Image (cartoon, grey):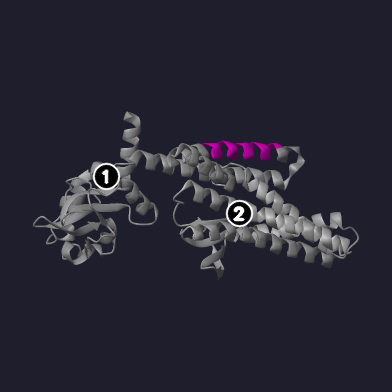
């Protein structure tokens, strides 16, 4: 997600990034405020004033979104979690949490910080609007009254208990707190999120066909987003629950075929890879694990050199980045794989090869244990 986002500045050690989708929304938002909203509530003013108000309101609104995300981030950092970036995109902001909160209380406080910030900004906006209106500055009053209202809407909308929205995280924290079970809490919160996501889509479609226009379509898209992310969170939870307590030794492919470093690549391909249907081969000499060779490494060597190149010349050495012990927790290995580590690992003990493990081994283990449970 957000591969094309650009970093605009850094605050508190956090990269503030804009996804390209943000520019579309920002443009549409400023445009609809300038030609519709402000001319509607402040008739008879100049075009320049409407555009100025529209653009200012758009910038201040995205500033509010940023403060909402920063509130989550500052609380999370206070609890020792890492936040690398905040990305503003089409549906608002996302703070990139590197790890999960370690207690229900922390999760609750991190989740609630954002809506509290939005409530506070909403209150300030409405107060400022009232004050400026009393002082006779009508356009500025309209601007701040608008910002106050939209921040209140944002706070309330974010509290809808649809995981991964803030309200869904609050729900998860509450179940986690009372049932003392994070896995069950995520399952319930993610299911609720999926149902509410479908609800958003239905409501959005209904509103669109009854003349609700853009806001109806918007709700449909948010529904898609919520369903997608809550399902992904649920699936990850199912996988983690299925693997809980299982060591790598139970899930790996044991005693895999290996190759000696003094073999040519041509012989490796013919006698091992094609003959045994494997694309990932550990390199072993005299019972000692040296590393591995795979299809990607072969692709880096020109085919007409395969007959004269030895495995020893090109294989990848075994390191803690690609090798785990047999008693390693499988859940942690999957977390490594999803965090961008390679999706195949060597399994070794005292320098001796015990097996290999890939994401496919993990998935088939989860499927089998569910089927037989
Ligand atoms: Zn939030």
Q: Looking at the image, which residue is at 56% across and 64% down?
A: 17
Q: Which residues are magenta?
A: 191-206
- Among the 4 quarters of the image, the one containing residue 26: bottom right
- Among the 4 quarters of the image, the one containing residue 136: bottom right
Q: Earlier in the sequence, mark 1 or mark 2?
A: 2
> Looking at the image, which residue sits at the far left?
286
| 324 sits to left or right of 66 | left
Determine the secondary structure under disc 1.
loop
| 225 sits to left or right of 52 | left
Tell me where residue 95 appears, x and y as whole percent: 54, 57
How many numbered circles are shown? 2
* Quadrant of the snapshot with the C terminus: top left
In the depicted structure, whether residue 167 falls above or below residue 305:
above
Residue 114's disc is 2
Residue 142 appears anywhere in the view: no
Residue 247's disc is 1
Dot 2, how many residues are within 10 Å of its Cα: few (below 14), some (14-19), or many (20+)? many
| 365 sits to left or right of 25 | left
- The mark closer to the camera, 1 or 2, is 2
Q: Nearer the viewer, residue 241 or 286?
A: 241
Q: Looking at the image, which residue is at 31% across and 34% down?
A: 368
Residue 81's disc is none
Residue 323 appears anywhere in the view: yes
Q: CA distance from mark 1 to mark 2?
A: 38 Å
Q: Main secondary structure of the magenta part?
A: helix
Tell me where residue 344 appears, x and y as whole percent: 29, 52
């Amino acid at each position: 997600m957000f591969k094309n986002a650009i970093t605009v500045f850094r605050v508190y050690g956090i990269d503030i990034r804009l996804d390209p989708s943000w520019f579309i929304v920002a443009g549409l938002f400023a445009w609809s405020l300038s030609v519709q909203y402000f001319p509607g509530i402040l008739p008879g003013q100049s075009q320049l004033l409407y555009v100025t108000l529209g653009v200012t309101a758009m910038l201040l609104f995205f500033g509010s979104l940023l403060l909402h995300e920063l509130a989550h981030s500052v609380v999370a950092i206070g609890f020792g979690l890492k936040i690398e970036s905040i990305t503003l995109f089409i549906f608002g902001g996302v703070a990139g949490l590197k790890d999960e909160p370690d207690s229900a209380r922390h999760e609750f406080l991190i989740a609630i910080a954002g809506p509290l910030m939005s409530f506070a900004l909403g209150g300030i906006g409405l107060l400022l609007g009232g004050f400026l209106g009393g002082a006779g500055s009508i356009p500025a009053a309209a601007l701040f009254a608008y910002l106050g209202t939209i921040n209140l809407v944002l706070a309330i909308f974010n509290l809808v208990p649809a995981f991964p929205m803030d309200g869904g995280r609050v729900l998860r924290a509450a179940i986690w707190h009372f049932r003392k079970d994070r896995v069950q809490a995520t399952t319930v919160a993610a299911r609720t999120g999926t149902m509410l996501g479908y609800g958003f889509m239905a409501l959005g479609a209904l509103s669109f066909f009854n003349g609700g226009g853009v806001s109806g379509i918007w709700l449909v898209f948010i529904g898609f987003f919520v369903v997608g992310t809550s399902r992904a969170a649920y699936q990850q939870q199912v996988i983690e629950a299925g693997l809980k307590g299982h060591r790598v030794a139970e899930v790996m492919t044991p005693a895999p075929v290996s190759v000696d470093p003094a073999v040519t690549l041509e012989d490796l391909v013919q006698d091992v890879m094609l003959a045994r249907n494997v694309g990932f081969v550990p390199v072993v000499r005299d019972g000692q694990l040296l590393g591995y060779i795979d299809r990607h490494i072969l692709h880096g060597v020109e085919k007409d050199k395969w007959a004269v190149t030895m495995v020893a010349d090109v294989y990848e050495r075994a390191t803690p980045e690609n090798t785990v012990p047999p008693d390693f927790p499988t859940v942690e290995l999957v977390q490594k794989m999803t965090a961008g580590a390679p999706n195949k690992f060597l399994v070794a003990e005292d320098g001796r090869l015990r097996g290999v493990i890939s994401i496919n081994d993990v998935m088939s283990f989860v499927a089998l244990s569910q089927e037989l449970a």
